[in-house]
Image: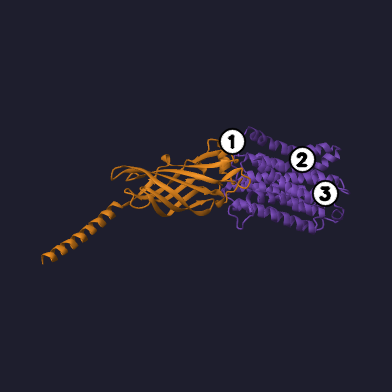
Chain colours: A orange, B purple
Amino acid sequence: MIRRTIISTVVVACMLSTLALGTAQSTGAKVETWKLDPVHCMALFRVQHAGAGQFWGRFNDVAGTIDYPRDDASAPKFNVVIKTSSIDTGTAKLDRNLQGPDFFNAREFDSITFKSTAAKRIGPKKWTVTGDLTMLGKTESIEVVVETTGIIGNPVVAKAGWEATFTIFRSDFGMNWGVDNGALGDEVKLIVGLEGDTGPGA
Amino acid sequence: MQEQALWAVGLPGGCMAIVLAIALLLGPLRRKAGIADAALALCIPGAAFITFLVEKGLPSLPPEQKWLILPWTFLIAGVLGLVATAIGGRKCPGAMAVLGAAAVGGAGGLWLALPGIDTVDARISLALELGIAVLVLAAVMRQGRQVLTCMALWGAATALSLTLASSANITLAMAAGAIAVTVAVAGVLLSIAPGSAPKQRLGVGAAIACATTLMMLLIVGRIYDNSLDGIATWRWLLVICGPAVLLLVPFATTLGRKSIALVGVLLPAAVAAWPAVRELMDMDPAGF
């Protein structure tokens, strides 16, 4: 009788603890929507010029949202929009060249978009995110390594940051000027710094 | 950049120069009626088409980007030119008018499909530029001692190439440059070709093909103008005024001053190109 009581107690305890754990997980994994702050977001790109130096430029207008739980229980879901007209190389004439039809064709395509479709954890706060990158009207699936760089705030209002690093081949999107003769490299490395806000003001 | 220009301008120009040399200098071909006109009708848009092949690869249909309809329009311009040559402009002026209208209408349709033309101002510009395109076509078709016409077209294509370069349209600039090389070669070959009469007119087919190709480049270049302050309208218009001056050539030659005619057809191009030359010389070395 005593044994039976002990077994029943253990079973009930196990069930309760499982239930409690499940409740804790679902509470901790609450996904919040972080609105990207354009002032503190940027996309840096690097491409080889004339087979010689690595040339850096950036896009200044990066917007969008990220769905992500503060406890890193699930992967961040990205919906990022980059304005092509915000390209900035530090040389105004070169910026206009890059906005032209041979490169980003800002007249026809005012933005570059990235929407995540899947993710795989590779470490604490570090994910390999798969998503659709759309540029010049062409969509390609790419893999992006994303790290959550920090979260600060209170339960109501908070800020979070991410850094994404990836490489693309621009010719995959039809941007092939200078690829064949090496005037401008095909492989483009990108580092995207993102900061988002959540809460009533975001 | 220099190597890129060599490929995208020199290769098409060289290819078309070979075709023209075969057509204009080889006896058996040269003696066939209309062969020179057909060669010019094919080579002028052909040069621009090859530039696009070099720069952008084989064109897709429908084009991935709107401006990439251009290589297809060059093919259409070549076909229109060949058909016009085959029909014979002087025998069927009505058919030529229809072909010319189709070419210009095609340019208008192209423009309507491109971005940034949904405002009233843009449509007024469309009407204005199409009117000038018709004028250019008419001028080239009506006039055109062929060597002088080639010089006028060379000036226009060169000025257009420089203007396109300063408007940040690299591929378009190279296509216009390839046309300039081809037309220059054609002018030289026509002037030295045995049996070429000095007063012989440029064929209607060649005129239609060249004027249409230049207008396509000009229209698309203007729409995709990415220069810092925007290229002034007068510069775009002046680019194609050289061929229109051909209309005045009979007066100049009546006065016995052929040099006036020569200066007249090249001056608008020089004035149009000068700001572009200055801008390109001032350009930062960081430019591609």
User: How packed is label 1: few (under 14 Cα within 10 Å), some, or many (20 or more)?
Assistant: few
Instruction: Report the residue marked by disc 2.
Output: B265
| Residue closest to the eye, B16 or B173 | B16
Q: Residue at x 51, y 54 (%)?
A: A139
If you read the primary sequence from the N terminus, does the residue marked by circle 2 or circle 1 appear first?
A: 2
| Percent position of residue B268, x then y | 73, 38
Instruction: Report the residue marked by disc 3.
Output: B201
Instruction: Identify the subunit bearing mark 1.
Output: B
Q: Residue at x 63, y 32 (%)?
A: B282
Check disc 3 and give the amino acid type: Arg
User: Taking the image as drawn, is residue B236 in sight?
Assistant: no
| Percent position of residue B199, x then y | 86, 46
Instruction: Report the residue marked by disc 1.
Output: B286
If you read the primary sequence from the N terminus, does the residue marked by circle 2 or circle 3 appear first?
A: 3
- Alpha-carbon span between mark 2 and mark 1: 35 Å
Check disc 1 and give the amino acid type: Ala
